[in-house]
Amino acid sequence: MALLDRFKLTGKVAIVTGAGRGIGRACALAFAEVGAKVVCAARTEEQIQDTANQVRHLGSDAVAVRCDVNERADLEQLVDATLGRFGRIDILVNNAGGTPPCEALYTSERMFEEAFHFNVTSAFLLTRLAVPHMLRTAGEGVVLNISSAAGRFPLAGFVAYSTAKAALSHMTRVLGQEFAPKVRVNAIAVGATETSALVPFLNDELRAKMEALTPMRRLGSVEDIALAALYLVSPASSWVTGKVLEVDGGTETSNWPFPPPSI
């Protein structure tokens, strides 16, 4: 097999959560471009239908499934819809997640637990639901978790989000060991990337500060993350599992330029 052929996903079926926009949408389109059939899942029907249409425009097949990853019934229905349409599951991308910033002393117990459920528990549950079907239908599979650089270094004001993403990264390592060699589990620790979650905070001054604090002197694009995702879900990374790939412009400390809150 030629080396470039190892990046192809011909005949594979991929579930991508949060596929209506941003990183999830970019991953769905990247997978379609190399031959995968894509199940586009998110809460907003219009957005996932648009992503599914773009997948079809690239010559692949797609289905849009409305799904709130916080709801177990939605996750079960997502797996059932995938099997009903395509008969197999090869790839799962747990991308849906996120939590707005909040100072620690103003973060309630409920807020903290909701952040953990949205970013970690939902990914664990969908993985637990999908993996048995990967083994039954394909005999193997790949799980990719979209984590964050915030889970790697302290980021004041993001105690719930950062702690949840650190847990997601470590869960990736544990499941990578437990599911090997049949199912590979990896994650991407995403740095500051221009998504709809970040763009509302950006102005020219803030962008310049963040770029100056980033060794590569620019913010990430969703395509930067999608290319890393393509590597990790494709046969090109067949000897990689239980790892967290840092795609963050080379940052070793936070490039969030706001001072920590005072108490």
Image: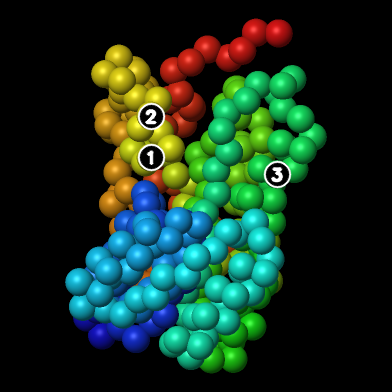
SS assignment at label 1: loop
Q: Is 9 left, or right, of 78 in this rendering?
A: left
**Front-most of residues 103 and 225:** 103
Give the image location of residue 137, x and y in percent: 53, 91
Neighbours of disc 1 within 10 Å: few (<14), some (14-19), many (20+): few
Sooner in the amino-acid sequence: mark 2 or mark 3: 3
* Position of residue 193 in the picture relative to residue 129 (left or right): left
Label 2: state its secondary structure: helix
Marks 1/3 in contact by CB < 8 Å: the verdict is: no
The vertical placement of 31 against 133, above or below, is above
Considering depth in this image, is 21 or 232 the residue closer to the camera?
21
In the displayed structure, 14 sits above or below 170; it is below
Q: Are marks 2 and 1 in contact (CB under 8 Å)?
A: yes
Q: Disc number at residue 114?
A: 3
What's the coloring here? rainbow
Whether residue 68 is situated above or below residue 151 in the rendered picture? below
Q: Which residue is mark 1?
A: 196
Residue at horizontal 65 percent and vertical 56 percent from the top: 70
Along the viewing direction, whichever of 146 and 243 lies nearer the viewer: 146
Q: Secondary structure at mark 3?
A: helix
In the rendered image, which quarter contains the N terminus?
Answer: bottom left
Q: Quadrant of the C terminus?
A: top right
- The three-letter code of the residue at mark 3 reads Glu
Q: Position of residue 237 (x, y in %)?
A: 40, 69
Q: Earlier in the sequence, mark 1 or mark 3?
A: 3
* Residues at marks 1 and 3, CA–CA distance in whole angstroms: 21 Å
Badge number at residue 200: 2
Q: Residues within 10 Å of mark 2 (few under 14, many from 20)?
A: few
